[in-house]
């Protein structure tokens, strides 16, 4: 058995779940987490003062699958969570 952990954008959660369900992958754990990647956070103005919010809201998926479902699970996550269209 393998544990697959993926960090995705919150707005992609429904698409990722739908793609996993299509591939008969039903047992997932979803957590809200904070972090940042290449974008290194965002800058906001609050009461006229510039604040650098370096942690952004993300979704962490934890999926435990048997060996035969590892490749299928990874492909489903990449296909549905990708921000770019091919």
Image (tube, rainbow, N blue to C red):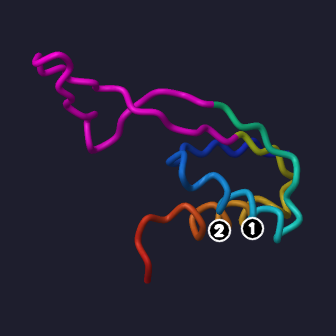
Quarter holding residue 76: bottom right
Looking at the rendered structure, the secondary structure element under dot 1 is helix
- Residue 5, image x and y in percent? 64, 42
Quarter holding residue 60: top right
65 displayed left or right of 85? right
26 displayed left or right of 86? right
Q: Which residue is mark 2?
A: 75
Classify 79 as above or below 6: below
Q: Which residue is mark 1?
A: 72
**What residue is shown at x 41% (from left), y 71% (from top)?**
84
- Residue 11, image x and y in percent? 54, 52
Q: Main secondary structure of the magenta part?
A: strand
- Residue 23, image x and y in percent? 82, 69
Classify 2 as above or below 57: below
Decide whether residue 71 is among the magenta residues.
no
Q: Are marks 1 and 2 in contact (CB under 8 Å)?
A: yes
Point out the stretch of residues depicted in magenta.
32-61
Decide whether residue 44 is among the magenta residues.
yes
């Amino acid at each position: 058995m393998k544990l697959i952990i993926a960090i995705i954008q919150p707005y992609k959660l429904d698409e990722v779940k739908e793609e996993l369900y299509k591939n008969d992958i039903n047992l997932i754990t979803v957590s809200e987490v904070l972090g940042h990647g290449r974008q290194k956070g965002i800058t906001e103005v609050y009461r006229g003062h510039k604040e650098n919010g370096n942690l952004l809201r993300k979704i962490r998926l934890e999926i435990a699958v048997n060996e035969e479902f590892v490749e299928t699970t990874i492909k489903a996550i990449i296909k549905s969570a990708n921000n770019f269209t091919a």
